[in-house]
Image (cartoon, rainbow, N blue to C red):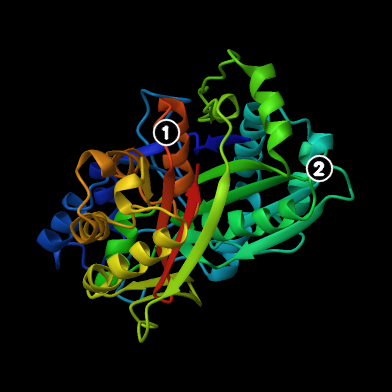
């Protein structure tokens, strides 16, 4: 029924980010050329972070900085503890999630008192009470709002959240499910020269996105007519609405596929100094080998072929993953242009990222059906079909 996105107030160019990265490596010049190459090949131009100070939208003439991660003074430096990072998540995640939620509710034409269910998706911070209770309080949702948290699912988490919303709305025609994805990936920056960590440091970013799922099509159609012509734009705080409510969309189905014997290909673990990601070099090859057969079979069960998909919302986990998807499915550059553009403009924000792509589809009135496609720890493939 509606979609909204939100970004941190400040962002940083990839060139500036590289300079920060070198300060957090010891010695900073040991593998300088390799780090330069990783950042140059990341396909990221700019990223937002809640940790940035100065510069940005508030003081455009001032240099951007950050004080959360100290410069490395020894090879054993690991930065803030996991506890310190989670406390910062608790401070920063709610305002970002709230802005995305307000934009989505506005886009849907849904009042806060109409929300019956709340689904919060995150893999970068946990505390209870957390973002879910904070949203009930700050949005003025009913104290009887039923809530679910989808945690630690990684980059495809938005699909897992939509799957929950589909189940909730299917049993309740009056349901209005608010699904909120919020990730502060920059809190989990890792020190040291381990390649997996350097790659993660080069692409991940912060952001939030929300969608409203309705329990019946009739209400969505009536709101479409009522809101026709009520365009809602973005603002300096990074909020935006797409006008999705002016063209009713239906979440038809979701699917999952575990790639056998791939548990170590992609992992996301809680360490003593933040959450640690590993991304094996074999991931693109496993995608090339396994994705076409599964996706063609799954789409056939929906009465579709790859050629029928009008919008490919492929999670941009990195340039090599996008290239693997494109090669394995025979997609054109144009079909993955939105995924690559979101990666370039915002980095990999984990779970909100695919919703940023959907927001672009809705704003451009891109022909459907749309397919959401993401990959996460496991190695797991997740898909969702929207018409």
Looking at the image, can residue 245 be seen? Answer: yes
Looking at the image, can residue 194 be seen? Answer: no
Question: Dot 2: what SS?
Answer: loop
Left or right side of 74 for 116: right
Left or right side of 294 for 49: right
Q: Quadrant of residue 113?
A: top right
Which residue is found at the position 67% from the left and 53% from the top?
Answer: 165
Left or right side of 244 for 349: left
Q: Residue furthest bottom?
A: 261
Task: Give how far across and how far down residue 133 sits, in percent.
Answer: 78, 52
Q: Are marks 1 and 2 in contact (CB under 8 Å)?
A: no
Q: Which residue, given by chain and number where applicable, does mark 1 sit on?
A: 360
As rendered, which of 58 and 382 lies closer to the eye?
Answer: 382
Which-is-in-front pick, marks 1 and 2? 2
As rendered, which of 78 and 183 lies closer to the eye?
Answer: 183
Q: Residue furthest left?
A: 33
Q: Quadrant of residue 337?
A: top left
Which residue is found at the position 55% from the left and 25% from the top?
Answer: 243
Crowding at dot 2, Cα within 10 Å, few <14 / some 14-19 / many 20+, comes out as some
Q: Which residue, given by chain and number where applicable, does mark 2 sit on?
A: 174
Which residue is found at the position 33% from the left and 59% from the top?
Answer: 201
Task: Give how far across and how far down residue 191 sits, in percent.
Answer: 34, 68
Question: Dot 1: what SS?
Answer: helix
Crowding at dot 1, Cα within 10 Å, few <14 / some 14-19 / many 20+, comes out as some
Task: Give how far across and how far down residue 184 sits, in percent.
Answer: 51, 53
Considering only vertical position in the picture, is 97 above or below 166? above
Left or right side of 224 for 272: left
Task: Give how far across and how far down residue 310 sits, in percent.
Answer: 36, 40
> Mark 1 or mark 2, which has the lower sequence index?
2
């Amino acid at each position: 029924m509606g979609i909204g996105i939100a970004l941190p107030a400040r962002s940083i160019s990839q060139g500036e980010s590289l300079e920060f990265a070198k300060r957090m490596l010891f010695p900073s010049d040991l593998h300088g050329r390799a780090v330069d190459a990783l950042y140059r090949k990341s396909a990221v131009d700019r990223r937002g972070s809640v940790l940035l100070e100065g510069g940005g939208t508030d003081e455009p003439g001032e240099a951007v900085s950050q004080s959360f991660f100290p410069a490395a003074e020894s090879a054993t430096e690991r930065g803030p503890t996991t506890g310190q990072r989670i406390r910062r998540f608790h401070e920063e995640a709610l305002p970002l999630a709230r802005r995305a939620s307000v934009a989505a509710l506005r886009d849907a034409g849904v009042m806060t008192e109409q929300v019956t269910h709340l689904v919060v998706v995150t893999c970068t911070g946990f505390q209870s009470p957390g973002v879910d209770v904070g949203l009930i309080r700050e949005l003025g949702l009913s104290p009887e709002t039923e809530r679910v948290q989808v945690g630690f699912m990684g980059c495809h988490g938005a699909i897992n959240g939509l799957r929950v919303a589909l189940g909730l709305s299917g049993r309740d025609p009056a349901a209005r499910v608010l699904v909120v994805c919020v990730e502060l990936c920059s809190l989990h920056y890792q020190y040291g020269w381990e390649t997996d960590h350097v790659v993660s440091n080069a692409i991940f970013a912060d952001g939030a996105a929300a969608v409203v799922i309705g329990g019946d099509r009739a209400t969505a159609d009536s709101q479409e007519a009522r809101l026709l012509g009520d365009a809602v734009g973005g603002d300096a705080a990074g909020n935006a609405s797409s006008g999705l409510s002016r063209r009713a969309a239906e979440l038809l189905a979701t699917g999952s596929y575990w790639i056998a014997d791939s548990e170590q290909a992609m992992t996301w673990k809680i360490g003593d100094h933040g959450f640690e990601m590993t991304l094996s070099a074999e991931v693109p090859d496993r995608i090339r080998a396994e994705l076409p057969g599964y996706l063609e079979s799954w789409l056939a069960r929906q009465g579709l072929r790859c050629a029928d998909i009008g919008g490919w919302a492929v999670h941009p986990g990195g340039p090599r993953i996008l290239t693997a998807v494109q090669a394995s499915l025979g997609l054109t550059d144009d079909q993955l242009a939105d995924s690559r553009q979101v990666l370039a403009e915002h980095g990999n924000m984990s779970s909100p990222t695919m919703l940023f792509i959907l927001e672009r589809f809705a704003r451009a009135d891109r022909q459907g059906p749309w397919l959401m496609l993401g990959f996460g720890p496991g190695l797991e493939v997740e898909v969702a079909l929207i018409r």
